[in-house]
Amino acid sequence: MLKDLREKLIIFLKMSLPPPQLDTSWCSALSSEWSKPYLKQLIYFLAEERQTSEVYPAKSDVFNAFNCTPFDKVKVVIVGQDPYHGPRQAHGLSFSVPAGVPQPPSLKNIFKELQDDLNILPPSHGNLMGWAKQGVLMLNAILTVRAHAPKSHYGKGWELFTDAVIHRLMNREDPVIFVLWGKTAQEKCRHILETTQNRHFVLMTSHPSPYSVHSGFSGCKHFSKINELLTKQGKEPICWELT
């Protein structure tokens, strides 16, 4: 019992908000979140979880999406669900896997649509960091998961944190294109859809999963539509080709 209490105290003392590995622009944009109890409880939960279970992605990769795409550089947000729960798959970007890891079915369908839309051949890898560095925030609703247990970190606080991310982006003067693939992403961003006179843009269709890809995702042409919207805003379009 004493050892357990000592370990909990060590976890508590190591808690740091904002997280030291988070990009400074996001630290500032989310400044009102750091004092909220839910976030402290979430960090404590994650520290305990990592002591007893395998958690993905690695601690250093949890905020990869934010570090690749600073707050003021965001042009597009592609909303995912929770990270891949298999070994070596998750690295902090929605739908993305590190180079050398087999492409999951949803990602293969994304690349197929990209080829049908813009005639860009599927890459040999599944790392979407090249998109992220051009202003595409690859945002999962939940940023961590227990190994082999999908949705295991739902209801622990990440939803509140990523809601705050979306709200900060909505409050920006500079327009953002929100890309919502599937009901989960659409429900996550329902406040955007309910907002009348919205200066932002929303593209919606079914999820690229094999179970729903033919319910609207195939043929959606979202990649060309994103670039058309960016061009109309006077912004540099995204180079979707991954080398």
Image (spheres, rainbow, N blue to C red):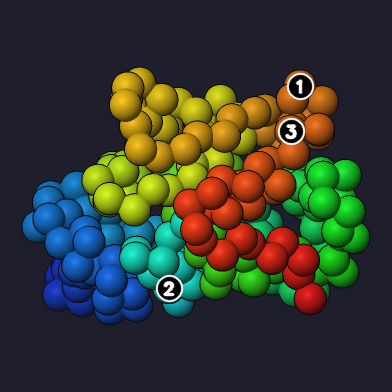
Q: In this view, does 82 lie to the left or right of 126?
A: left
**Kind of residue indicated by mark 3:** Cys
Q: How crowded is mark 1: few (under 14 residues within 10 Å), some or many (20 or more)?
A: some
Q: Is mark 2 on a helix, strand or loop?
A: helix
Query: Of the residues under marks 2 and 1, which one precedes in the sequence?
Result: 2
Q: In this view, does 70 lie to the left or right of 168?
A: right
Residue receiving disc 1: 215
> In this rendering, does residue 14 appear at all?
yes
- Could you tell me if the residues under marks 2 and 1 are in contact, i.e. CB atoms within 8 Å? no
The front one of 200 and 235 is 235
Residue receiving disc 3: 220
Mark 2 vs mark 3, CA separation in Å: 29 Å
Q: Which mark is residue 45?
A: none
Q: In which quarter of the image is the N terminus?
A: bottom left
- Quarter assignment of residue 238: bottom right
> In this rendering, does residue 47 appear at all?
no
Q: Is mark 3 on a helix, strand or loop?
A: loop
Residue receiving disc 2: 67
Q: Which residue is drawn at 12% across and 50% down?
A: 37
Q: What element carries label 1?
A: helix
Query: Of the residues under marks 2 and 3, which one precedes in the sequence?
Result: 2
- x%, y% of residue 51? 40, 67
**Kind of residue indicated by mark 1:** Ser
Q: Is residue 150 left or right of residue 164?
A: right
Mark 2 vs mark 1, CA separation in Å: 33 Å
